[in-house]
Amino acid sequence: TITFYEPVRLGDVLTTHQVLRSVSGPKTTKLGAGRFWVIDVVYRNQDGELVGVETYTGFGYRRDAS
């Protein structure tokens, strides 16, 4: 999901950085054993103002040996 706090206008220069918000304990899925990661991508404009935060969840895993 993404939440905007300020309007982004044509010509704005945006910078981002990522924040690792959480990592789950070990989980096993059909993909293999791994962990869920929650990451925030923080967006700021050329004035350093916070304009938005995007949050996503990923699953890092190691495939089972076949």
Image: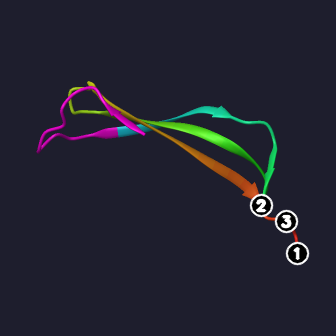
Q: What element carries label 1?
A: loop
On screen, 29 above or below 15? below
Residue drawn at (74%, 55%), measured in percent from left and top? 61
**Quadrant in which residue 48 is drawn:** top left
How many angstroms separate mark 2 from mark 1 (CA)? Answer: 13 Å
Residue drawn at (18%, 32%), measured in percent from left and top? 7
First in sequence, mark 3 or 2: give its number: 2
Depth check, front residue: 43 or 53: 53
According to the picture, the residue beneath numbered tag 2 turns out to be: 30
Mark 3–mark 1 CB contact (< 8 Å): yes
Q: What element carries label 3?
A: loop
According to the picture, the residue beneath numbered tag 1 turns out to be: 66
**Residue 19 placed where, x, y %?**
52, 33
Say which of marks 2 and 1 sits in front: 2
Hey, what amino acid is under mark 2?
Lys
Residue drawn at (12%, 44%), measured in percent from left and top? 11
According to the picture, the residue beneath numbered tag 3 turns out to be: 64
Majority secondary structure of the magenta segment?
A: loop
On screen, 3 above or below 66? above
The residue stretch that appears in magenta: 1-15
Q: Is mark 2 on a helix, strand or loop?
A: loop
**Quadrant in which residue 36 is drawn:** top right
